[in-house]
Amino acid sequence: MKEIINKYCEYRQKIRSYSYALTFLSWDSSTVAPKGCFADRSNYIGVLVEEQLKIVKSKEYQDIVTTLYNNLNLLDEDLAFEIKRVKESNDKNNKIPTEEQVEYEKLTSLSQDVWVKAKTENDFSIFKPALEKIIDFKKKYCEYVKTDKLQGYDCLLDDYEEGLTQVECDKFFDTLKEKLVPFVRTVLAKKVNFKDKFLTDYFPVEKQKEVVQYIKDVMEYDMDRGAIMETEHPFTSGVNNNDVRITIHYYPEMMTSSIFSAIHELGHATYEQQVDSKYNNTSLSGGCSMALHESQSRFYENIVGRSHEFWETHYPKLQEIYGDYLKDYTLEDFYKGINKVEASYIRTEADELTYPLHIMLRYELEKKLINGSISVENIEQEWNKLFKEYFGIEVDCPKNGVLQDVHWSSGLVGYFPTYALGSAYASQIYNAMKKDFDVSEALKEKTTGKINKWLKEHIHQYGASKYPQDILKMATGEEFNPQYYIDYLIEKYKKIYEL
Amino acid sequence: MKEIINKYCEYRQKIRSYSYALTFLSWDSSTVAPKGCFADRSNYIGVLVEEQLKIVKSKEYQDIVTTLYNNLNLLDEDLAFEIKRVKESNDKNNKIPTEEQVEYEKLTSLSQDVWVKAKTENDFSIFKPALEKIIDFKKKYCEYVKTDKLQGYDCLLDDYEEGLTQVECDKFFDTLKEKLVPFVRTVLAKKVNFKDKFLTDYFPVEKQKEVVQYIKDVMEYDMDRGAIMETEHPFTSGVNNNDVRITIHYYPEMMTSSIFSAIHELGHATYEQQVDSKYNNTSLSGGCSMALHESQSRFYENIVGRSHEFWETHYPKLQEIYGDYLKDYTLEDFYKGINKVEASYIRTEADELTYPLHIMLRYELEKKLINGSISVENIEQEWNKLFKEYFGIEVDCPKNGVLQDVHWSSGLVGYFPTYALGSAYASQIYNAMKKDFDVSEALKEKTTGKINKWLKEHIHQYGASKYPQDILKMATGEEFNPQYYIDYLIEKYKKIYEL
């Protein structure tokens, strides 16, 4: 058994080396790579993917995994869990022809650049052909991997949150619709007069960068195991707890954007930096599932970063950095501004309360794209129609609509629902944390150290060594319950909007 | 034949894909990678190198190359040249055990970080164990690849400049010693009173970056196929003419450093950006040899960038950007300052005239390290002793001495001589260029376009499709002749120093 485990570890290291290279090529593509490189980059990536697949699909490796899978009881708990996941992933993987996987990787490595171009030129037609190919692949993919239990769009949901189905999503979103949507209407109808011009005032990018540096320290992000760069769309990229990087986008006339995308991405990064080192270089490093990952970023972004307590301590520093730019705004102005509820175009800039509506929209469209009831040809109109229905306003241009997200261009279809689910997890986790210590007081501290510590102990340290549902249950003492999310939102916004 | 050529191209693409990934991992290591990542990075790199070597050393690939090599007359000129070089490289490669190559790649990928640490802490003992391993490998390497013609240090010289030997180097450096060293002494003895405090005055890094942006435009560097970042030691990294990047280091109290390292690296980058596109994704892309590459960077750095004519046009812009910081210095002050001859510690900051002495020192030490007459154990003392002998001053600390260069940490032993050779090539090329047009007038133009064009036509376009000696001969009409270098230097510095 020991010999076969060693052999497995050798293969794992080999397979991970390709992923490692591909991760950094993708990081490079999103950060410093010049436009010109994309002409041939996808070919090189194609070769590396093909070489990796050759190893993953090799008989020897598959046999090793199967042997270990048939002897799970002889393995330690972590390795047994890892083998179980690898086996499942192999079984899925084996159903897809290698050439198609390679083509798909080449396609998505090219498409991100096409999407940037389309967004820059504000023209969906530039991106349409690439998106058509991606959706076609996704449909074929669903056909390949379908089982008795999983069909169509379920296969994609399952890729990002194992076991998540349309039935569950529908149930979750229906609950939100039923309980939150009337509340959102009440909030939107309430006449308020927030002093919030700072939201659209000019704030120098250099100063915004200073703020991000400050926030990074408040959140105790370890720069010896991280990096911060600039990209069109902020994201986090990690290989294990030794190297977890984030990116930010700075808008001179949307100062809060860099603050909250920094807190959000640093939330993801804190998760991965706090995974137990023993999982480095195994398949159990990194976050556990997309929804759990998102629960951490949203916990920091909203529950920490949009709390009154947090800014009681940090707003003076913000005022110090921004000087005259912010001197006319009180803490109360700032707090209300960053929690202002609005029907707005951009998901990533949306307030906490309308955020789930943005996700519902994407969920509805993705379901229909995959089941074929709408096509990429008319996705732009469908987006705009649904947006009008949910938000009551007209989309003014594609980059404020269908072109706003990077996800589809990199093949992430079925991923959005995990965002809303993550927000709901975050509220449930918040509730559990409050039983252990006074979170309100902890939020007022100079750093988020106490909160980081609790999250490390109850969630982060485990990495991907358990199922997300199990981690959630261990951390909160109960199954997933969206009621915490609804209660949290209604309580918070009732206070802010004096309802 | 066509089939076997296609098969070769497939292999070439596969092999290049690994190099491609490794290039960007190395780029990442030198630019944004956090310290923490180096613990496991070298293992991942090791796997990729091993996988690549497996392909390079596979019987099928070797047979394909041999078959093509035996039928060179049936191939077009470019492919025939490529196969010839690949065959030579394979033959060399085959002599080294794969495990040792992999170990070596892992070692050098780790050593660069160790060197940075040693340099930062100004402590050679931190770097010594890594350097010992590198030199040990290099010695074993020479044993593996030696032939009747090539022995010892010659094997390393040959890696960077095919056919270059100690005999030739000795001859070249002896000529320089004989004719230049007395002149250098005369110059150093001359009492001058240059107004050159700007060389050590404070200039804000932000302003220095503006200057680099300006210079990049003057040199017509194409940012759509390039990028500029910051690193400890400036360098150029390219994969083909679609992606050639440079890095700069900014010293607040050495403003000219960023100017001349920018011009130098942009010289390298211009070379690679101007290679004919038909060579992209073949082994003939990029520069032809290290000395020819260096001839281009030094051509731009010294012949262009340290010329009076160039600054007649661009000094006003420099004064505009630096405002009060530079207002007290005239063009003449600036010109004399940037051409001031001094016995100084740092090679990369050295003036044109003493530069070859820095190379001679490294050449002497490398020769002795490889033939075993000195060891890494006492390299620091040997460096300091020789430095005193050549420059008449004592090295004050290791980062101003033996720790200053990145080269040895990345395994570049036998590389330095190409720098001096490159400078000499540059003068010969300058002489040829002057026969075709009035270079003095061209230097005064708003951009270096005319000069770029000539270099593209006579040198750059060919990439690595010919031997460097042949390109030099085609471009200048004669064999290498170091006299042009000596004449150029003596004429220039006689004028500046009024001798």
Image (spheres, coloured by chain):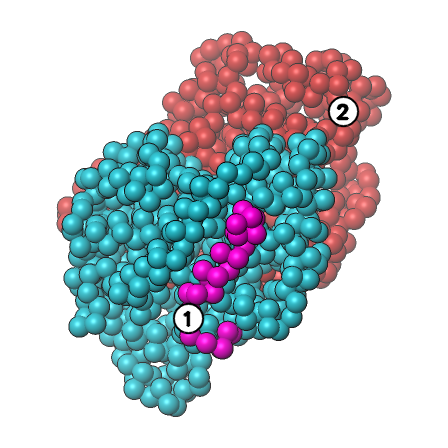
Chain colours: A cyan, B red
- In depth, the one of B22 and A323 nearer the eye is A323
Q: Chain of mark 2?
A: B
- Say whether residue A486 is magenta: yes
Q: Residue at x 67, y 62 (%)?
A: A442
Q: Which residues are magenta?
A: A474-499
- In depth, the one of A457 and B175 nearer the eye is A457
Q: Residue at x 46, y 76 (%)?
A: A478
Q: Residue at x 39, y 79 (%)?
A: A81
Q: Quadrant of residue B192?
A: top right
Residue labelled with disc 2: B198
Secondary structure character of the magenta stretch overall: helix
Q: Quick one: SS at disc 1?
A: loop
From the top left corner, tell me how far across and down residue A494 is, in percent: 53, 52
Q: Nearer the viewer, mark 1 or mark 2?
A: 1
From the top left corner, tell me how far across and down residue B359 is, in percent: 64, 40
Disc 2 residue type (three-letter): Phe
Q: Are marks 1 and 2 in contact (CB under 8 Å)?
A: no
Spatial separation of the CA atoms under disc 1 and disc 2: 66 Å
Residue labelled with disc 1: A480
Q: Residues within 10 Å of mark 1 (few under 14, many from 20)?
A: some
Side (left or right) of A169 relative to A94: right
From the top left corner, tell me how far across and down residue B194 is, in percent: 80, 19
Disc 1 residue type (three-letter): Phe
Q: Are marks 1 and 2 on the same chain?
A: no
Which part of the image, by quadrant, shows the N terminus of chain A? bottom left
Q: Quick one: SS at disc 2?
A: helix
Side (left or right) of B128 relative to A229: right
Side (left or right) of B439 relative to A15: right
- Say whether residue A168 is magenta: no
Side (left or right) of B57 relative to A495: left
